[in-house]
Image (tube, helix red, strand yellow):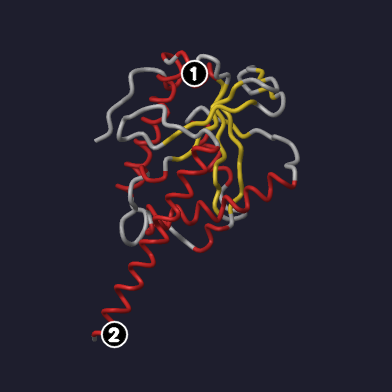
C-alpha cells in the first residue's frame, strides 16, 4: 500500500509539473505572438492578436480586406473555457459554453467600437479547430454563420504554415489536458483548420449592443 501511495504521489507531482510547463509555454508563446485580453470580464473566453492580413479577401457582405489591413486574430482563452463534467459534454455544459462564447463576441465588438487601439481593425479572423477529418461540416458552418462568421478560402498554405499548425495541434491537446482534461480525446490530435472571418461591420451589427450577462 505504501508503494502504491508513493507511486500515486509521484505520478501526481509529475502531472502537476507538466501542467505548469504547458502553462508557461502557452504564456510565452502568447506574449511572443501578441495575444492579449481585450476584456477583464471573467466570462470572456477569447483573446486577440492584431495582425496584418496576408492577402486581399472579399467577404460575402461586400467588405474588402486588403493585404496589410489590421485584423483581429481571435484565440481561445483556454483557462476560461468551462470545465467539462466527468463523462463528457452535456446540455448544461454546452449551454454555458455557448453563452460565454456569445458574450465574448459581444465584449469584442464593444471593445472594437469603443477602444481607440481597435479602431483600425478591419475584420476578425479565427481558426476553427474542427476535430477529425470528415464529420458534419454543414452543421459547423451553420453555427459559424449564426455568429456572423463565414468560411474563407485563404489559398494553399505554405509548408511552414502547415508545420506550425501541426505543432500547434500538439500544444492545443496539451492545453486541453492542462485546463480541461475531461474534454481531451485521442482523436482530437487530428484537426482540420477552418479559417473563418467576420467583417468589422458584421461584428458591430450583430454583437456591439451592451454585452449580455451569463448566469
Q: Quadrant of the C terminus?
A: top left
Residue 86 located left or right of residue 121: left
Nearer-the-camera pick, 121 or 89: 121
Closer to us: mark 1 or mark 2?
2
Could you say where residue 113 lies in the image, as x and y percent from the top left? Answer: 44, 14
**Badge 1 or badge 2: first in the primary sequence:** 2
Q: Residue at x 37, y 17 (%)?
A: 209
Could you say where residue 137 lies in the image, as x and y percent from the top left? Answer: 58, 45
**Residue assigned mark 2:** 3
Could you say where residue 195 lies in the image, as x and y percent from the top left? Answer: 61, 37
Marks 1/2: CA–CA distance: 57 Å
Total numbered circles: 2
Q: Quadrant of the N terminus?
A: bottom left
Q: Which mark is residue 165?
A: none
Quadrant in which residue 151 is drawn = top right
Q: Residue at x 46, y 13 (%)?
A: 116
Quadrant in which residue 183 is drawn = bottom left
Nearer-the-camera pick, 41 or 90: 41
Residue 125's place in the image compared with 29, above or below, is: above
Residue 80 located left or right of residue 157: left
Q: Secondary structure at mark 2?
A: helix
Could you say where residue 110 lies in the image, as x and y percent from the top left? Answer: 40, 19
Q: CB of mark 1 within 8 Å of CB of mark 2?
A: no
Crowd tier of the residue under label 2, counting other residues whose Cα lies within 10 Å: few below 14, some 14–19, many 20 or above: few
Q: Secondary structure at mark 1?
A: helix
Nearer-the-camera pick, 121 or 10: 10
Quadrant in which residue 42 is drawn = top left
Crowd tier of the residue under label 1, counting other residues whose Cα lies within 10 Å: few below 14, some 14–19, many 20 or above: some
Q: Residue at x 63, y 23 (%)?
A: 60
Q: Residue at x 35, y 61 (%)?
A: 16
**Residue assigned mark 1:** 118
Amino acid at each position: 500500500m505504501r508503494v502504491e501511495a508513493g507511486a500515486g504521489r509521484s505520478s501526481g507531482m509529475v502531472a502537476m509539473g507538466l501542467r505548469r510547463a504547458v502553462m508557461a509555454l502557452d504564456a510565452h508563446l502568447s506574449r511572443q505572438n501578441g495575444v492579449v485580453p481585450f476584456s477583464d470580464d471573467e466570462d470572456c473566453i477569447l483573446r486577440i492578436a492584431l495582425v496584418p492580413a496576408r492577402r486581399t479577401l472579399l467577404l460575402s457582405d461586400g467588405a474588402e480586406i486588403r493585404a496589410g489591413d489590421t485584423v483581429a486574430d481571435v484565440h481561445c482563452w483556454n483557462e476560461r473555457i468551462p470545465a467539462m463534467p466527468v463523462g463528457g459534454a452535456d446540455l448544461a455544459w454546452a449551454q454555458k459554453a455557448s453563452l460565454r462564447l456569445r458574450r465574448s463576441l459581444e465584449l469584442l465588438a464593444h471593445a472594437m467600437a469603443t477602444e481607440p487601439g481597435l479602431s483600425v481593425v478591419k475584420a476578425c479572423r479565427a481558426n476553427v479547430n474542427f476535430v477529425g477529418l470528415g464529420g458534419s461540416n454543414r452543421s459547423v458552418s451553420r453555427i459559424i454563420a449564426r455568429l456572423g462568421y463565414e468560411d474563407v478560402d485563404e489559398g494553399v498554405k505554405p509548408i511552414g504554415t502547415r508545420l506550425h499548425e501541426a505543432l500547434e495541434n500538439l500544444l492545443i491537446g496539451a492545453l486541453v489536458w492542462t485546463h480541461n482534461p475531461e474534454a481531451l480525446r485521442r482523436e482530437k490530435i487530428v484537426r482540420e483548420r477552418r479559417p473563418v472571418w467576420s467583417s468589422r461591420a458584421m461584428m458591430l451589427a450583430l454583437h456591439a449592443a451592451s454585452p449580455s450577462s451569463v448566469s
